[in-house]
Amino acid sequence: QVQLVESGGGIVQPGGSLRLSCAASGFTFSAYHMIWVRQAPGKGPEWVSGINAGGDKTYYADDVKGRFTISRDNAKNTLYLQMNNLKPEDTDLYYCARGMMVTSKVRGQGTQVTVSS
């Protein structure tokens, strides 16, 4: 059974940091490009970051570049998103997805990130 399970979300003050994890199972994790996506209630999904299968190429949306770092551990079948200098506008549900498209059917349930003072 293909499964992606996120963890690591929470409530943090502006300027704070969080590290999200996405545990993958049921497929060959190391063979797939992976992405992080965020979505606010009533809005469409927003692509945040992506990483290639080998982990040596990373991509970021302009508004997170320099603050977020995507990485993966293929031996542990886990994807990460280190988020630093968080801003209130980063408040969203974050989820990981397999492949390059925000419309991927293989995605997790998400973890909530709330940035508030």
Image: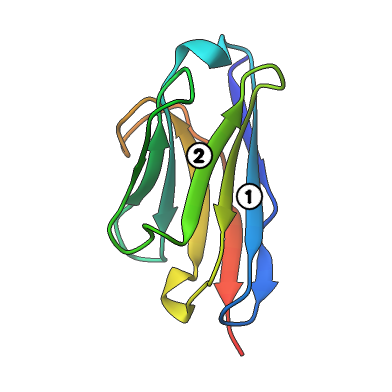
Amino acid under disc 2: Cys
The residue tagged with tag 2: helix, strand or loop?
strand
Relative vertical location of residue 32 with respect to residue 116 in this rendering, above or below: above
Residue picked out by circle 2: 96
Work out whether 86 lies above or below 53.
below
Q: Residue at x 65, y 53 (%)?
A: 19
Is residue 110 something that shows in the picture?
no
Q: Residue at x 45, y 69 (%)?
A: 90
Disc 1 on helix, strand or loop?
strand
Viewer-closest of 86 and 42:
86
Nearest the eye: 39 or 28: 28
The image's mark for residue 110 is: none
Tell me, yes or no, whether the two marked residues, 1 and 2, touch with CB atoms within 8 Å: yes
Q: Amino acid at mark 1?
A: Leu
Q: Could you tell which of marks 1 and 2 lies nearer the N-terminus?
A: 1
Q: Which residue is mark 1?
A: 20
Q: Residues within 10 Å of mark 2 (few under 14, many from 20)?
A: many
Would residue 67 appear left or right of 112 to someone viewing this image?
left
* Crowd tier of the residue under label 1, counting other residues whose Cα lies within 10 Å: few below 14, some 14–19, many 20 or above: many
Q: In x, y percent, where is residue 22?
A: 62, 37
x%, y% of residue 62? 27, 58
The correct choice, above or below, for 83 with respect to 4 in the image is: below
Question: Can you tell which of label 1 and label 2 is closer to the viewer?
Answer: 1
Image location (x, y in percent) of residue 33 = 41, 23
In percent of the image, x 30 and y 33: which residue is there? 101
Which quarter of the picture shows residue 112?
bottom right
In the shown orientation, is residue 42 left or right of residue 53? left
Q: Distance from label 1 to label 2 (Cα)?
A: 10 Å
Dividing the image into 4 quarters, which one contains the C terminus? bottom right
Up-down: is 82 above or below 102?
below
Work out whether residue 100 can be spotted: yes
